[in-house]
């Protein structure tokens, strides 16, 4: 037999009291746990928060969706305008290229006309000088035939 120094020995009456206290504590604990389970279960099934959030979303989303649709339409219109402006830019670039080409051709033509003008001015000066020469009243000046004809776009008559 072993003996423990801190061993407490209860009488039958004390054991009955301890058993009754333990059963009472067990019953109270069980009731508290049962209440907690019911509260937790009710909280788990309570949709008040979700309902409030859904209601808020339902009232706030339509204006946001409308605004989003308006912004999308604005972007679409801006894209169309950008394409139109790009086409105009392409047309302008093409026109500038043609203008540069015509300008070069005009410069070349003007250089040739300046040379021709110099010769004409020299002939005019000679003709004026010859007016003062006696005996040239019967002189005939014939226009030589050109080897190649060129349309200068100028009418002489």
Image (cartoon, rainbow, N blue to C red):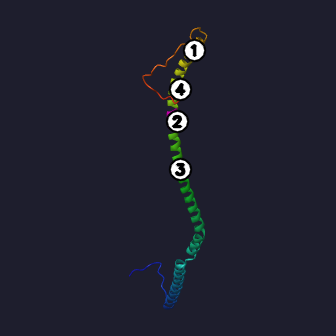
Q: Which mark is residue 110?
A: 4
- Magenta part mainly helix, strand or loop? helix
Which residue is painted at 46% across and 27% down in the image? 150
Measure the alpha-carbon separation of dots 3 and 4.
Answer: 38 Å
Q: Residues within 10 Å of mark 2 (few under 14, many from 20)?
A: few
Q: Which mark is residue 127?
A: 1
Which residue is label 2 attached to? 99
Q: Which residues fall within the magenta stretch? A: 97-102
Question: Picture coordinates of residue 50 (x, y %)?
Answer: 55, 74
Verify CB contact (< 8 Å) between mark 3 and mark 1: no
Judge whether residue 76 is colored magenta: no
**In the image, residue 47 above or below residue 97:** below
Measure the alpha-carbon separation of dots 4 and 1.
Answer: 25 Å
Q: Nearer the viewer, mark 4 or mark 1?
A: 1
Which residue is painted at 52% across and 32% down in the image? 103
Nearest the viewer among 34 and 130 is 130
Image quarter of residue 134: top right
**In the image, residue 37 above or below residue 16:** above
Image quarter of residue 126: top right
Q: Residues within 10 Å of mark 4 (few under 14, many from 20)?
A: few
Nearest the viewer among 119 and 140 is 140
Measure the alpha-carbon separation of dots 3 and 2.
Answer: 22 Å
Verify CB contact (< 8 Å) between mark 4 and mark 1: no
Q: Which mark is residue 84?
A: 3
> What element does badge 3 sit on?
helix
Question: Picture coordinates of residue 107 (x, y %)?
Answer: 52, 28
């Amino acid at each position: 037999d072993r003996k423990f120094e801190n061993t407490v020995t209860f009488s039958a009456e004390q054991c009955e009291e301890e058993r009754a206290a333990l059963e009472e504590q067990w019953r109270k604990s069980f009731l508290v746990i049962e209440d907690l389970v019911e509260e937790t279960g009710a909280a788990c099934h309570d949709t008040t928060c979700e309902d409030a959030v859904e209601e808020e979303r339902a009232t706030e989303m339509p204006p946001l969706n409308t605004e989003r649709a308006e912004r999308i339409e604005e972007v679409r219109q801006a894209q169309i305008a950008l394409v139109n402006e790009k086409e105009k830019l392409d047309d302008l670039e093409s026109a500038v290229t043609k203008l540069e080409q015509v300008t070069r051709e005009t410069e070349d033509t003007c250089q040739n006309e300046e040379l021709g003008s110099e010769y004409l001015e020299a002939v005019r000066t000679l003709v004026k000088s010859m007016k003062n020469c006696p005996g040239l009243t019967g002189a005939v000046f014939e226009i030589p035939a050109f080897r190649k004809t060129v349309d200068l776009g100028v009418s002489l008559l």
